[in-house]
Image (cartoon, rainbow, N blue to C red):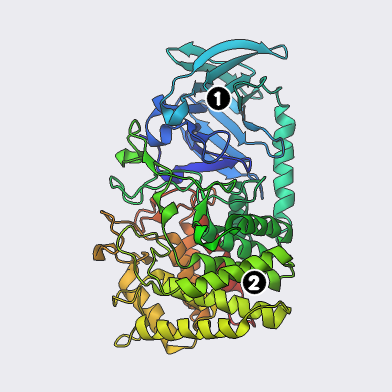
Amino acid sequence: MPLPIEDYALLGDTGTAALVGTDGSVDWLCLPRFDSPACFAALLGDPGNGRWLLGPAEPGSCTRRYLPESTTLETTHTTPTGTLRVIDVMPIGDRRADLVRSVECLSGTVRVRHEWVVRLGYGKVRPWVHRDTIAGYEVIIAVAGPDRLVLRGDRLPVNDDGRHVDEFDLTAGQKLHFATTWSPSHHPPPQPLEIASRIAHTTESMQEWAGHCSYDGPYREAIVRSLLTLRLLTHGGTGGIVAAPTTSLPEDFGGVRNWDYRFCWLRDASMTLGALLRCGYRQEAELWRKWLLRAVAGDPEDIQIMYAVDGSRDLPERTVDHLPGYDRSGPVRVGNAAVDQRQGDVVGEVLFALEQSRAAGLQDSTFSWALQRVLLDHLASTWRHPDNGIWEIRGTPRHFTHSRALAWAAFDSGICAVEDHGLEGDVDRWRAERQAIRSTVLTEGVDRARGTLTQHSETTEVDASLLVLLQLGFLDGDDPLALGTVQAVEEDLMHGGLLRRYRTETGVDGVAGDEHPFLACSFWLVSAYAAVGRVDHARALFERLLTLRNDVGLLAEEVEPVTGRHAGNFPQALSHLALVNAALDLDGAGQPPR
C-alpha cells in the first residue's frame, strides 16, 4: 500500500503538483494541470497504476528538508553501505511541465533502484512506450491519446513488461540527472532542460519570493513554509488556488468521505487574499483578487462555490472504479458534486476579502465595485434561504449561523466601502440588512441556556465555524456570547486536544462514517483564544499544532491526535491558511488592531 500521507512531500511548478514519498517514489502527479488525469496514480492504488521511483535499493533511513525558504526538496538516504542524496524539483517559469531529479552518492557505495511506470487516465491507460533520439540524446517516450511523457537521463532504465526499471551502483562523488517532461502528443517533444541550472534558478526564485514576507516574528519559519505551500497550490497563469493537489485521500480510513479537492473554492481564494495582504504580498494579492472578480462576474444567480483553475464551471462528480483508493478507502472520486450547492457564506467571504484589499490600498475599478454592489443586492434577497453551509453538507439544507454571519460581514464590508473609502452605494439599505441579519442570528442562532451560538436554527449543537465570527467582528472578544461559544466548542468538539468540525453523529451532513479533528478548526481556536484574552492557551495550542506538521512542514486536512497520522487531502490549503492567520493573530494578541 502507499506510504502514510504524512510521509509525502509536495513538488510543484504553479501549474500542477506531485507527491513524492520518503522512499523516493513519486506516487501522484497530474499533467499538465492540477485537475488533469493522473499519470502517476500509485497513491490511490499500487505501483502498477503508475509511479516514478528513484532511491536506494536497500533499506535504510532517510531525512528530508526543503532547501531554506524554497520548494526544492533534498532527501538524504543512509544505507549500510553509503549515503545517497536526491534533489527533486519542478522548475517554474518555463511554460512547460517538467519534474527533474538529481541523485548523488555522498559517501561509500549505494545501490540505486530506478523505476518509471507511466499509466495515464488515473492509472488505467497503458501507453505506447518506445526509445527514440531527440537533440542527439536517447530518450524514452510514452504516448497515449493527447499525452506524451518523455524520460531523459544520464542512464535510462530498460523495459520490463510495461515498466522501465534499472539498478546500479553509485560511489562517492558520482551524480546522475533525470527529467520527465509532458507535452501534447501532437506537438514536437520539448528540448531538454539544463537540469542543474533549472534547479538553481527555481531554488533562488522561490527564496527571493519568500524574502518578500513582511512578517518577522517568532513564527516566521512556519508562516513562510505555509506561504510557499500556498504558492505551489496556486496556478501561476490564472491566480486560482486549489484546495489541495489530490483527490479522494480519506477523512475516514476505510470509509466513503473521499472528495476531489483539485479545484478553486471562492472561500479559499478569499482567505488567501487576506493572508497575503497581511504578509505584505500586494502583487500576488492583486492576482488572486483578479481571479475572484473574474470568477464571480455575471449573473449572481449563476455564482458557484468552486471553479476549475481557469474559471471553468462544469465539474461533474464521477467515480474511478478501477482504483481501490488510498488504504482501500473507496470510492475514488473525480469532480465534486458540491459545485451545485448553495453555500450562503461564499459571497460574504468574497466581499469581506475585497474590503480587506481596499483597506490595504488596492483600488477598485468601476467594474469591480459595480459587481460588488450587484452581489449585495442579490444577497439581500437570498440570505434568509437555507443552504449547505461551509462544510458542504449533503443532507437537508439548514439556516446555518456561520452562513448568516458571513452575510452580515458582506453588508458590513459594503458599508465600510462607502463610509471609509468614498464609494457610492445604497448604504441605508445595507445597514438595514446588516441589522436584520444580526437580530435573526441573535434570535434563532443562540442557545440561551448555555449562552452560546448554535450550528443552525434548529439545533443546540455547536460548530467550530462559529469561532470565525470573532475574526469578522460580529462578536467582540469580551462579549459573554463569545466566551460561551468558545467554551461550548471546547466542551463538545474537542478530541484529544484538537477540534472536530461538528459532531458527525447528529447526521446533519447526510454522509456515513466519521472523521478526525479538522486542523483549520484548531487554528481558528488559536485565533479565538487570542481574541478573548486567553493568550497562554492560544500559544500552547499553536505550538502543539506546529508539531503535527510533517518533517517538511506540511499539513493535511485532518489528523488523528494520538498517533499524529494525517488524513484527508494533502497538503490542504485551508490548513495552511489558518496557520498563517493564527500565527499573526497570536503575535498581535493584546496589541491594537492593524
Q: Nearer the viewer, residue 577 or 534?
A: 577
Q: Secondary structure at mark 1?
A: loop
Q: Nearer the viewer, residue 141 or 265?
A: 265
Upstream in the sequence, badge 1 or badge 2? Answer: 1
Residue 264: x and y, percent?
53, 52
Residue 579: x and y, percent?
53, 62
Residue 158: x and y, percent?
52, 12
* Among the 4 quarters of the image, the one containing residue 181: top right
Q: Is residue 144 above or below residue 246?
A: above
Can residue 557 be seen here? The reply is no
Asked whether, in this view, residue 236 is left or right of residue 307, the answer is right
Tell me the distance, in whole angstroms, between the alpha carbons under discs 1 and 2.
43 Å
Residue pointed to by mark 1: 146
Residue depicted at x 53% and y 33%: 77
Q: How packed is label 1: few (under 14 Cα within 10 Å), some, or many (20 or more)? A: few
Q: Is residue 67 above or below residue 47?
A: below
Q: Amino acid at mark 1?
A: Pro
Q: Nearer the viewer, residue 195 or 351?
A: 351
Residue pointed to by mark 2: 355
Q: Nearer the viewer, residue 371 or 295?
A: 371
Can residue 313 be seen here? The reply is yes
Asked whether, in this view, residue 255 is left or right of residue 77, the answer is left
What number is the disc on residue 284? none
Residue depicted at x 46% and y 88%: 479
Asked whether, in this view, residue 593 is left or right of residue 389, the answer is right
Q: Is residue 564 above or below residue 56?
A: below
Q: Quadrant of the C terminus?
A: bottom right
Q: Amino acid at mark 2?
A: Glu
* Among the 4 quarters of the image, the one containing residue 561: bottom left
Residue depicted at x 69% and y 23%: 190
